[in-house]
Image (tube, grey):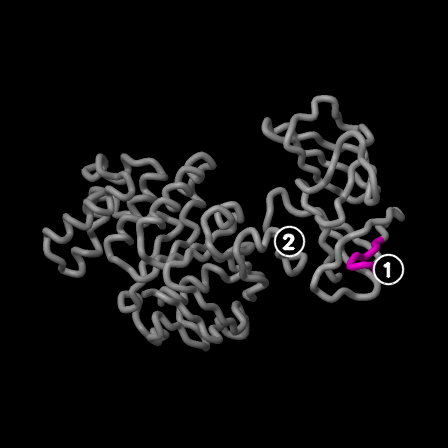
Amino acid sequence: MSRLELQSVSKSFGALEIIPALDLVIEHGEFCALVGPSGCGKSTLLRIIAGLEPATSGRVLVDGEDVTGAEPPERGVAMVFQSYALYPHMSVSANIGFGLKIARKAADEIRSKVDEAAQKLHLDALLKRMPRELSGGQRQRVAIGRAITRDPRIFLLDEPLSNLDAALRGGMRVEIARLRQSLDATMIYVTHDQVEAMTLADRIVVMNKGRIEQIGAPMDLYHKPVNRFVAGFIGSPSMNFFDADLSGRAGGNVRLRLADGTEIVAAEGPAPLPEARVTLGIRPEHIEFGEGLAGDNRVSGTVQVVERLGCDTLLHIDLSGSPMVMRQPRDLPGIRAGERVTCRFPAESCHVFAG
């Protein structure tokens, strides 16, 4: 088993509070991603779990055992860093097995575990190479292999793909997803890239200024963000936001008035709303566009930029002084910058946030 529990864990550097007291439980076998902007405390929290950084207060428990004061080797965790941290004078095989050698394991056991890790990570043909002879993705796989050989209860990965180019990141995401299926271990993955979190994690923890804003399955966070911060962080391109006045309620819907006077009907969510100013949000891919638009919630604006991405098209639109991005899953060959277009916000796709 490898259940992790954080109880009122906080971190301060002198008078500067980085992480206010927080609680978090990650179950055995779960792949949990910690996401948030730079400086939100996610890497610091990971280092506290690993024992590389002491918590100012609170407790860290692994399978019910209090490891708050334990040294990193005693916690049953293995960490993969953003930098590969490979020994340049050692072969791939020696790098993968180095932790076992330090632990004075038998040569046969080291060889067996190195071969097993290499097979899982498709490094079999590279065991005799030196790190300088490897690509960035191969080096990161070696670093992951070194962690695997320790048979940890918990894997900690601190932005392991951030040094790779876009093509390698996509390939390594697939490698990590495959690896996760073959390991009976809990994995905690820190990233600022919400695409990595959405595609890999069972649950996502969204952090902001050291606090947990929301915890949930990827699609729960996508469809039901609890506030504007989560809504803006999850999804690419980001959700569109508009200042609005709350002008009425009826039948589970709210009526909003945008800055240019446009009336929008939106489904009322579970969160309480103030009586006046609110924020209307809608994702670029949920905006309707095309011939024959009917019903409420039609808006018009001027196209500023057209991004043709092949499989879809992004239109950057000036909506009476408010910027908006609309995503369409097709080419729009007739649309050019400077044109006036009309689109529609489906009421069920609108999100309304306080403030």
Range covered by the magenta-colored residues: 249-256
Q: Nearer the viewer, residue 157 or 349?
A: 349
Percent position (x, y) of residue 309?
60, 29
Q: Which residue is mark 1?
A: 248
**Secondary structure found at label 2:** helix
Question: Which residue is painted at 68% across and 45% down in the image?
Answer: 283
Crowd class of label 2 (few under 14; some 14 to 19; many from 20; radius 10 Å): many
Viewport quadrant of the N terminus: bottom left
Percent position (x, y) of residue 149?
24, 53
Number of the label disc, if any, that sits on residue 231: 2
Percent position (x, y) of residue 272?
73, 66
Q: CA distance from mark 2 to mark 1?
A: 24 Å
Q: Nearer the viewer, residue 310 or 220?
A: 220
Mark 2 or 1 closer to N-term?
A: 2
Q: How many marks?
A: 2
Secondary structure character of the magenta stretch overall: strand
